[in-house]
Image (cartoon, rainbow, N blue to C red):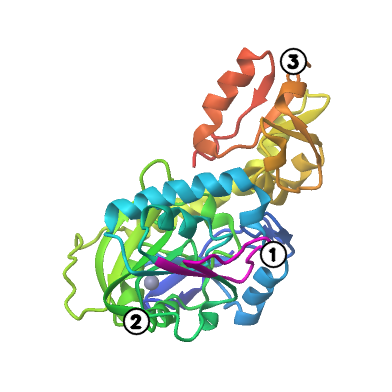
């Protein structure tokens, strides 16, 4: 592939094409496979990654209105995630009067925050608000986008958007629309995957941007927001970054001159995507002698295997996990791990996040099973 150069929509620097992990298909972050190649670019100035062709706002709206279901698919994971994010946000902020969350999912994070902020009220907006989500006295939940925040609900002294900005077609415009709802002296808290090095989030088609710290600060400036601080997430949350913005003129946060090396990041992304491109053959080689194949795990990582290792996926008979009700619907039967463990020697393809695969493999080996890992190819 020739690497044609196009301007970065964030910083106008030169961006170059990245390898396709599959020639004709990719995946949305809720697991759906779509017939569009993952053609992304990597900016050699700010280090951000983005799509080679601009995706229309209507395309993106369609993704969420057409059954985006991350929050409701796995209720326990949703609650655990809300607790982890709630703990993280609480350590950074004093109790506000009013909180707005854009992309609130089921409202679990707002409920978690209100639990320890008894005098605060909250409003949450999400295009895929579950039908079961109910507004309560201090918590108003609305189905929709930022334009649908009820008139008179604000202003808000804390505005939170967790894992939203990377889905927006124009991150600066998104921040500006949040700023319109911000009280004087309030803060905007943006949590997104930390773009400092490639990981699975690069594989999601609906992540329109992989943002670096520098890229986020550029977006903030474009929205007349000062970057107060940028913090990596605690390990309970994962490989995410919190950026705190304030509607103030002075930029008090002075980061290291270059906290990202865009050329290094480009070559790491290139190598990362090439590994995904070879994953299917790698797994076919690893599982060749197995009569039948199960996966351990039935969430986002299993969905990634379905999307990017399709030949291997056709060999999967069923998905096993400790807690079957948490399984995503991936078109395979789901079984409890306790039942699968009854077949000694059974080959099991590990479908948990790469950093956890060795620990899972040791457990499966102790149970007499034959785990197949792939974190040696794709470590994160
Ligand atoms: Zn750039």
Q: Earlier in the sequence, mark 2 or mark 1?
A: 1
Magenta residue span = 121-140
Name the spot of residue 56 as percent of width and height, x first.
61, 81
Q: Determine the residue positioned at 52% across, 83% down.
A: 147
Camera-nearest residue between 243 and 196: 243
Other-residue count near label 1 (Cα within 10 Å), few / some / many at <14 / 14–19 / ≥20 = few
Tag 1 residue: 131
Q: Who's the residue at 75% across and 48% down the image? A: 329
Task: Give yes or no for residue 133 being in the magenta stretch.
Answer: yes
Identity of the residue furthest to the front in this view: 137
Identify the residue under disc 2.
223
In front: 23, or 359?
359
Work out whether 121 lies above or below 221. above
Instruction: Give how far across and how far down residue 183 sits, in percent.
Output: 31, 79
Q: From the viewer's perspective, is 27 left or right of 291? A: left
Q: Position of residue 369 (x, y in %)?
A: 69, 18
Residue 42 visible to the viewer: no
- Is ligand 1 within 8 Å of the beta carbon of the residue shown at mark 3? no
Q: Is residue 149 magenta?
A: no
Residue 345 - label: 3
Question: Which callout, 1 or 3, points at the residue further toward the start of the chain?
Answer: 1
């Amino acid at each position: 592939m020739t690497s044609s150069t196009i301007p970065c929509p964030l910083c106008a620097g030169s961006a170059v094409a990245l390898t396709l992990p599959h020639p004709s298909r990719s995946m949305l972050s809720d697991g759906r496979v779509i017939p569009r190649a993952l053609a992304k670019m990597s900016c050699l100035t700010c280090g951000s990654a983005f799509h080679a062709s601009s995706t229309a706002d209507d395309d993106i709206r369609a993704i969420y209105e057409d059954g985006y279901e991350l929050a409701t698919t796995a209720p326990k994971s949703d609650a655990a995630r809300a607790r982890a994010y709630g703990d993280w946000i609480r350590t950074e902020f004093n109790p506000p009067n009013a909180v707005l969350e854009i992309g609130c999912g089921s409202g679990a994070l707002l409920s978690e925050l209100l639990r320890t902020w008894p005098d605060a009220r909250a409003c949450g907006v999400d295009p895929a608000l579950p039908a079961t989500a109910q507004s309560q006295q201090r918590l108003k939940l609305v189905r929709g986008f930022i334009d649908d925040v009820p008139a008179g609900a604000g202003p808000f002294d804390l505005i939170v958007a967790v894992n939203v900005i990377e889905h927006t077609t124009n991150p600066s415009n998104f921040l500006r629309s949040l700023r319109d709802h911000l009280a004087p002296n309030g803060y905007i808290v943006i949590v997104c995957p930390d773009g400092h090095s490639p990981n699975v989030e690069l594989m999601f088609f609906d992540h329109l941007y992989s943002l670096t710290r520098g890229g986020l600060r550029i977006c903030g400036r474009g929205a007349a927001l000062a970057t107060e601080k940028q913090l990596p997430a605690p390990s309970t949350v994962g490989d995410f970054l919190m950026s705190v913005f304030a509607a103030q003129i002075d930029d008090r946060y002075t980061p290291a001159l270059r906290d990202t090396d865009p050329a290094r990041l480009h070559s790491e992304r290139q190598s990362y995507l090439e590994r995904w491109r070879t994953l299917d053959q790698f797994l076919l080689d690893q599982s060749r002698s197995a009569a039948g194949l199960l996966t351990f795990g039935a969430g986002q990582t299993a969905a990634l295997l379905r999307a990017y290792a399709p030949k291997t996926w056709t060999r999967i008979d069923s998905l096993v996990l400790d807690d079957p009700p948490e399984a995503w619907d991936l078109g395979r039967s789901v079984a409890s791990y306790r039942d699968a463990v009854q077949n000694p020697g059974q080959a099991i393809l590990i479908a948990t996040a790469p950093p956890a695969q060795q620990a899972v493999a040791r457990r499966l080996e102790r149970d007499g099973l034959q785990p197949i890992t792939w974190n040696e190819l794709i470590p994160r």
